[in-house]
Image (cartoon, helix red, strand yellow):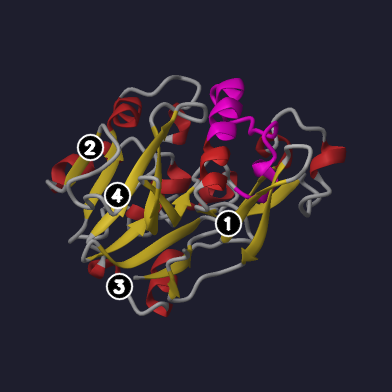
């Protein structure tokens, strides 16, 4: 099996919102800030093939479904559908994808499921041959959003996914489409029922899989958020997220599971570390993956 990092459309968002209650004097050391207080963010997907005999895409990024006014409001930097271009550069088309795994249905993670905006045209799903995997708890959230995060969802998307006949809703740690090759962890701090997909590593120690890669989604958007106290203003329950993140990192460190970041513009993959004071960090950082073998 090989892994590719697949870049989608990029964003610029307010740095204060992205770093929650961390002061700007702290977070501006970790990133570049523009005159509008915005920071650069990637919307990166992970492609794995063959995985359980299939070509699997983990997330789709924000895509190009927004009309121009909303594209500007949400800081989307490109009008074209960058994800499709990046798939092509890796030697794939969206029609080649057998499974799309969605950590959650916020537009910056699921918007790439849709074709690029065209005036007068309704939203249209891409990936016509793929099963779409969504967590059960988050599916309910997407169907009936809370006022706090309603604007983060694409209203038409749940109906389109249901109408496809290829939606698989997951309520445990595995799926029909991917079997034991992908293990799902669940998190509620950012949004109810966030799915954290771990490509299971090749080594087994004391009955536990070691090696492998986990898609960190919005539990850990990038390297700065590996530091346990750092959260986003978008997180629904920051204290819960901190507790979930600590347990998550302890587990991945113990089992040598590498972290894949969706929003870090400079790093796709990294290994977890912890120093003598107990602070988590990263090492062996990779800005991109091109047909990389699964780490062990």
Q: CA distance from mark 2 to mark 4?
A: 22 Å
| Marked residue nearer the N-terminal end (2 or 4) | 4
Residue 62 image point, x, y percent? 46, 52
Q: Secondary structure at mark 2?
A: strand
Q: Residue furthest right?
A: 25
Q: CA distance from mark 4 to mark 3?
A: 19 Å
Q: Which residue is mark 2?
A: 169
How many numbered marks does the figure carry? Answer: 4
Q: Nearer the viewer, mark 2 or mark 4?
A: 2
Q: Secondary structure at mark 4?
A: loop
Q: Is residue 184 visible?
A: yes
Residue 239 image point, x, y percent? 61, 21
- The image shows residue 69, relative to residue 232, as above or below, that is below
State left or right for residue 69 relative to residue 112: right
Q: Nearer the viewer, mark 4 or mark 3?
A: 3
Q: Looking at the image, which residue is at 25% across and 60% down?
A: 127
Residue 96 image point, x, y percent? 24, 70
Q: Which residue is mark 3?
A: 93
Q: Looking at the image, which residue is at 33% across and 45% down?
A: 183
Q: Are marks 1 and 3 in contact (CB under 8 Å)?
A: no
Q: Secondary structure at mark 3?
A: loop
Instruction: Give the crowd class for mark 3: few <14, some 14-19, many >=20 residues within 10 Å.
Output: some
Residue 236, magenta (yes or no): yes
| Marked residue nearer the N-terminal end (1 or 4) | 1
Which numbered dot is residue 42? 1
Q: Which residue is mark 4?
A: 123
């Amino acid at each position: 099996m090989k892994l590719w990092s697949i870049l989608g459309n990029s964003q610029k968002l307010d740095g204060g919102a992205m770093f929650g209650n961390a002061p700007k004097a702290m977070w501006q050391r970790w990133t570049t800030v523009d005159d509008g207080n915005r920071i650069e963010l990637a919307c990166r997907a992970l492609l794995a093939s063959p995985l359980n005999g299939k070509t699997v895409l983990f997330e789709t990024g924000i895509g190009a479904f927004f009309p121009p006014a909303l594209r500007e409001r949400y800081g989307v930097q490109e009008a074209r559908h960058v994800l499709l271009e990046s798939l092509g550069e890796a030697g794939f088309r969206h029609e080649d994808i057998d499974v799309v795994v969605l950590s959650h249905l916020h537009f910056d993670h699921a918007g790439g499921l849709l074709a690029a905006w065209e005036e007068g045209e309704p939203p249209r799903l891409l990936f016509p041959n793929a099963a779409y995997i969504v967590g059960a708890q988050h599916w309910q959230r997407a169907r009936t959003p809370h006022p706090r995060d309603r604007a983060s969802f694409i209203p038409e998307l749940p109906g389109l996914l249901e109408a496809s006949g290829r939606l698989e809703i997951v309520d445990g740690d595995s799926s029909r489409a991917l079997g034991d090759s992908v293990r799902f962890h669940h998190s509620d701090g950012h949004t109810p029922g966030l799915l954290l997909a771990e490509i299971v590593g090749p080594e087994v120690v004391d009955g536990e899989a070691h090696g492998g890669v986990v898609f960190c989604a919005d539990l850990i958007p990038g390297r700065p958020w590996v530091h346990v106290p750092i959260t986003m203003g978008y997180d629904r329950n920051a204290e819960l997220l901190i507790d979930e993140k600590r347990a998550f990192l302890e587990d991945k460190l113990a089992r040598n599971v590498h972290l894949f970041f969706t929003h870090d513009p400079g790093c796709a993959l990294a290994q977890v570390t912890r120093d003598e004071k107990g602070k988590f960090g990263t090492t062996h950082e990779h800005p991109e993956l091109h047909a990389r073998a699964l780490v062990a």
